[in-house]
């Protein structure tokens, strides 16, 4: 087992125990996150999100939601978040996660569909900020992300992709704020600069 996978397993078992069932579920999730069509939404994204939600005050629910937020990811579908939430609801009870935590995990996964939540919803803010953190990355990392997204949607013709991506970016840029936690508030400007640059290319 590679060191990165060992670290992922250690984090997972800290949440769900070390039973055979827990290991089997971890294996299933790793296999899902390793699917070949995932050019951006793969293991590297999972590791990045987990690292950002893993703080001393983070709840188990937000950590588990990080594991499940893109567990189902098919770019040809429009219900990935719903399917991921349903997967969490169906599988987490089998490894002893209590009902209230399972419900919260499912709720948080569904929030990542729109990344919109109440200002007081600190778990949603943390998960969404971690999920969107690439928006505020260095320009080179952002370009890599944008190219990877295009590769995931290779089945979509250029005119349709440009229109859809333009709509997504325009909607995000139209929000009063992109990030909901104090840790990410300082990155707001960098994220907007990156998206504006991509939008300019899409419109050129």
Image (spheres, rainbow, N blue to C red):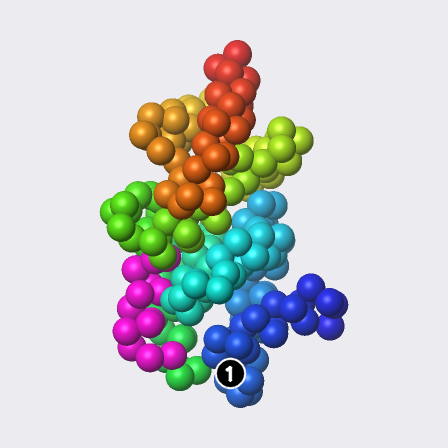
Q: Identify the main secondary structure in magenta.
A: helix
In the picture as drawn, the residue positioned furthest to the bottom comes out as 19
> Within 10 angstroms of label 1, few (less than 14), some, or many (20 or more) residues?
some
| Vertical side of 92 occupied by 203: above or below | above
Residue 144 placement (x, y as % from top left): 64, 35
Residue 22 placement (x, y as % from top left): 51, 81
Residue 125 placement (x, y as % from top left): 37, 49
Image point (53%, 12%), residue name: 204
Q: Which residue is mark 1?
A: 17
Q: Nearer the viewer, residue 73 or 189?
A: 189
Magenta part of the protein: which range? 97-109
Asked if residue 22 lies in the magenta stretch, the reply is no
* Disc 1 element: loop
Q: Nearer the viewer, residue 79 or 63?
A: 63
Image point (40%, 66%), residue name: 59
**Drawn side of residue 50 relative to residue 68, left or right:** right
Q: Nearer the viewer, residue 111 or 75?
A: 111
Query: Can residue 51 be seen here?
Result: yes
| Vertical side of 85 occupied by 145: above or below | above
Q: Quadrant of the N terminus?
A: bottom right
Query: Can residue 132 be seen here?
Result: no
* Quarter occupied by residue 26: bottom right
Residue 108 placement (x, y as % from top left): 34, 58
In the picture as drawn, the residue positioned furthest to the right comes out as 2
């Amino acid at each position: 087992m590679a060191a990165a996978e060992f670290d992922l397993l250690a984090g997972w078992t800290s949440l769900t125990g070390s039973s055979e069932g827990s290991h089997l579920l971890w294996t299933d999730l790793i296999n899902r996150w390793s699917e070949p069509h995932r050019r951006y939404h793969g293991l590297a994204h999972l590791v990045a999100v987990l690292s950002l939600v893993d703080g001393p005050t983070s709840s188990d629910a937000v950590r588990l939601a990080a594991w499940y937020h893109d567990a189902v990811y098919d770019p040809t579908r429009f219900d990935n978040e719903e399917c991921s939430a349903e997967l969490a609801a169906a599988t987490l009870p089998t490894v002893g996660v209590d009902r209230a935590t399972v419900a919260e995990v499912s709720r948080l996964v569904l929030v990542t569909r729109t990344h919109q939540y109440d200002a007081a919803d600190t778990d949603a803010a943390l998960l969404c900020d971690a999920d969107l953190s690439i928006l505020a990355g260095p320009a080179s990392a952002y370009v890599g992300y944008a190219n990877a997204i295009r590769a995931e949607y290779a089945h979509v013709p250029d005119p349709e992709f440009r229109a859809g991506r333009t709509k997504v970016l325009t909607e995000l840029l139209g929000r009063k704020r992109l990030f909901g936690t104090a840790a990410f508030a300082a990155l707001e400007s960098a994220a907007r600069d990156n998206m504006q640059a991509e939008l300019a290319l899409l419109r050129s």
